[in-house]
Image: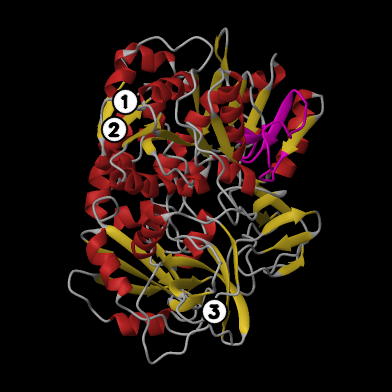
């Protein structure tokens, strides 16, 4: 133990997942320490990292203090320290997990020299647009920009509208889009930096340090924690994209983080989307482009009613699809089912192939093998009812669909079934089939066909309708061409669904009209605040929680409890008051699903409300 006389005392939050407590340490003479610095300390017989969260504190005189072992480098500033505390309360998590995201992935010894004067950007300035002017003049606005509109012009306009000496923070739904946007800004001589780290930290050391003094900072989800000490404006592109929500607990959402950050910094915040979420519409003032411009921003859409197809043709390959893939131009086919088959039945007795352990439907990832996605049980291709080894596919997976598509078009068909890392890393064949990832991996095409869109419309997540419309908007951007818009083909058994009508009429407001009463009837966000508590320690946590005032506790269903409150303040205060029990625990605030494995349609019908008939 080091003993230092008359030294400064700082407070440190250790980077230890199980500890959310601060400790006081002495600062050795000659060691420079600033608020937010990343340090190394001795804690319980081992050396761990941490962050300085307070300077010149008054220690407890009865406690013998240890000295800081090392100052590793610079870390998040005072604004991000406070923001992490708020986010830990808002999403029922640990501050250390959030500060880890806000810290550089490499050691930063200094921030470099800060710019005083703003650089004069080159290139033509975007023309004045009354719609953009109205959106940028508001402190809290939501701009409904069609997928075919030029978003780069909006970014340039936002940069010019930001006060001199203050910074513009731009969030993109993916690292690849952030990289492309930052590069394009720099080509136009805009001082911009792309924060491309989205796992484990906001960015590497050099880019993180530059973010302190550049005019424009561009990042993906973790960019919400970018070090922008002079924040003047925030721009969130495609705020509806689910990539902005962290999957691991705490399940923070970048949109909500930057909105709170902008409020604290007295900065303007603009959310941009072709189909804004209800949460965004509930937060800010909606600004729309003229109806003619919005219609031109959506491509021609052909809807195929699968109920009227000849059963001999199969459910996926309608005559309209065959004509499309056999025609000219590049065609992307989307089928969000990996493997060869996702539902099978015995060819002899017609019994569905189910798992003998958990009774779930089994798929066929490869010939001769059946796999249960729920419990992981594997078995040979055998019918449990009659012992037949011949099964027929009721729901083709991507791999089997690619084989049949190749036979239809008479040429090689590429396949994309993994997430990928960058746009452009995809097969160069004229026809490509894949999961939703194909829309992110291929930059442009002449047409996009959704082979089974009901899988998106009737997904088990209560935001499935919003996400389905967002997928159509993504496809519309892929088929945008200089000579006009390409085509979208949608195969569905529910052609009257509000999502389909919204896309056909180029008016996302139709979906909002049907979704708002549905959420109100079911008590779903944004009309309420919600959390799901699960895993082994969940029963102990719920027992300690009790029945707090204003919080409704429901469950358990499939080992999970649902908590619901009229607002986040009531819900998060109740969660913060409960000490974490030992064991594995997941508290998911603003969950993607209202119950594990349960669909929104089933809950709606049981409540006397059919979302498929919500819109006249």
Farthest residue to the left: give it. Answer: 549
Q: Marks 1/2: CA distance?
A: 8 Å
Q: Which mark is residue 136?
A: 1
Q: Quadrant of residue 231?
A: top left
Query: Residue 236: where, in percent of width, then height?
Result: 42, 36
The answer to whether residue 302 is seen in the rendering is yes
Query: Image point 42% across, 13% down: which residue?
Result: 296
Q: Is residue 428 magenta?
A: yes
The residue where tag 2 is placed is 141
Tag 1–tag 2 contact (CB < 8 Å): yes
* Mark whose residue sits in front, 3 or 1: 3
The image quadrant of residue 347 is bottom right
Quadrant hosting residue 467: top left
Tally the marks.
3
Find numbered disc 1 in the image and state the secondary structure of the residue it sits on. helix
**Between marks 3 and 1, how big is the CA–CA gap?**
49 Å
Looking at the picture, the colour scheme in use is secondary structure
Q: Which residues are magenta?
A: 416-441
Front of the two marks 2 and 3: 3
- Label 3 element class: loop
**Numbered badge on residue 245:** none
């Amino acid at each position: 133990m080091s003993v230092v006389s008359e030294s400064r005392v700082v407070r440190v939050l250790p980077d230890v997942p199980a500890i959310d407590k601060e400790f006081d340490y002495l600062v050795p003479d000659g060691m420079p320490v600033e608020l937010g610095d990343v340090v190394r300390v001795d804690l319980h017989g081992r050396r761990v990292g941490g962050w300085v969260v307070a300077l010149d504190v008054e220690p407890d005189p009865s406690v013998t203090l240890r000295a800081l072992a090392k100052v590793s480098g610079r870390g998040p500033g005072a604004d991000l320290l406070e923001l992490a505390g708020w986010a830990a309360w808002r999403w029922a998590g640990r501050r250390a997990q959030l500060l880890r995201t806000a810290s550089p992935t490499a050691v930063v010894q200094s921030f470099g020299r800060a710019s005083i004067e703003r650089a004069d950007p080159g290139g033509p300035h975007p023309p004045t647009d009354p719609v953009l002017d109205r959106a940028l003049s508001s402190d809290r606005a939501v701009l409904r920009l069609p997928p075919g509109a030029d978003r780069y012009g909006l970014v340039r306009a936002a940069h010019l509208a930001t006060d001199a000496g203050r910074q513009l923070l731009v969030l993109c739904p993916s690292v690849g889009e952030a990289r492309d946007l930052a590069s394009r800004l720099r080509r136009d001589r805009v001082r911009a930096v792309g924060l491309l780290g989205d796992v484990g930290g906001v960015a590497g050391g050099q880019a993180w340090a530059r973010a302190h003094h550049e005019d424009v900072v561009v990042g993906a989800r973790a960019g919400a924690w970018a070090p922008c000490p002079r924040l003047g404006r925030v721009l969130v592109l495609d705020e509806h994209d689910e990539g902005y929500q962290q999957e691991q607990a705490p399940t923070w959402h970048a949109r909500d983080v930057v909105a709170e950050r902008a409020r604290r910094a007295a900065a303007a915040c603009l959310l941009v989307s072709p189909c804004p979420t209800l949460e965004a519409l509930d937060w800010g003032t909606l600004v729309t482009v003229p109806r003619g411009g919005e219609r031109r921003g959506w491509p021609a859409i052909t809807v195929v009613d699968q109920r009227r197809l000849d059963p001999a043709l199969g459910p996926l390959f309608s005559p309209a699809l065959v004509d499309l893939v056999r025609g000219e131009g590049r065609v992307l086919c989307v089928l969000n089912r990996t493997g060869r088959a996702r539902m099978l039945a015995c060819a002899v007795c017609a019994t569905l192939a189910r798992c003998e352990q958990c009774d779930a439907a089994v798929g066929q990832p490869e010939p001769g093998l059946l796999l249960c996605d729920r419990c992981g049980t594997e078995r040979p291709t055998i019918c449990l009812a009659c012992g037949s080894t011949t099964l027929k596919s009721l729901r083709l997976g991507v791999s089997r669909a690619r084989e049949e598509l190749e036979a239809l078009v008479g040429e090689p068909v590429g396949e994309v079934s993994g997430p990928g890392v960058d746009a452009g890393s995809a097969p160069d064949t004229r026809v490509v089939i894949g999961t939703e990832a194909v829309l992110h991996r291929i930059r442009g095409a002449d047409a996009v066909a959704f082979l089974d869109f009901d899988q998106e419309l009737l997904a088990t997540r209560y935001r499935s309708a919003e996400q389905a419309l967002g997928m159509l908007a993504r496809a519309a951007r892929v088929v945008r061409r200089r000579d006009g818009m390409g085509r979208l083909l949608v195969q569905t058994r529910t052609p009257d669904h509000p999502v389909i009508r919204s896309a056909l009429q180029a008016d996302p407001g139709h979906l909002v009209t049907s979704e708002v009463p549905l959420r109100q009837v079911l008590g779903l966000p944004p009309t309420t605040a919600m959390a799901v508590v699960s895993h082994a320690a969940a029963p102990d946590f719920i027992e300690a929680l009790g029945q707090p005032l204003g919080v409704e506790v429901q469950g358990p269903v499939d080992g999970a409890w649902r908590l619901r409150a009229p607002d986040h303040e009531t819900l998060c205060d109740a969660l913060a008051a409960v000490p974490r029990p030992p064991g594995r625990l997941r508290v998911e605030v603003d969950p993607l699903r209202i119950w594990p494995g349960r669909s929104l349609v089933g809950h709606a019908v049981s409540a006397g409300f059919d979302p498929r008939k919500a819109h006249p």
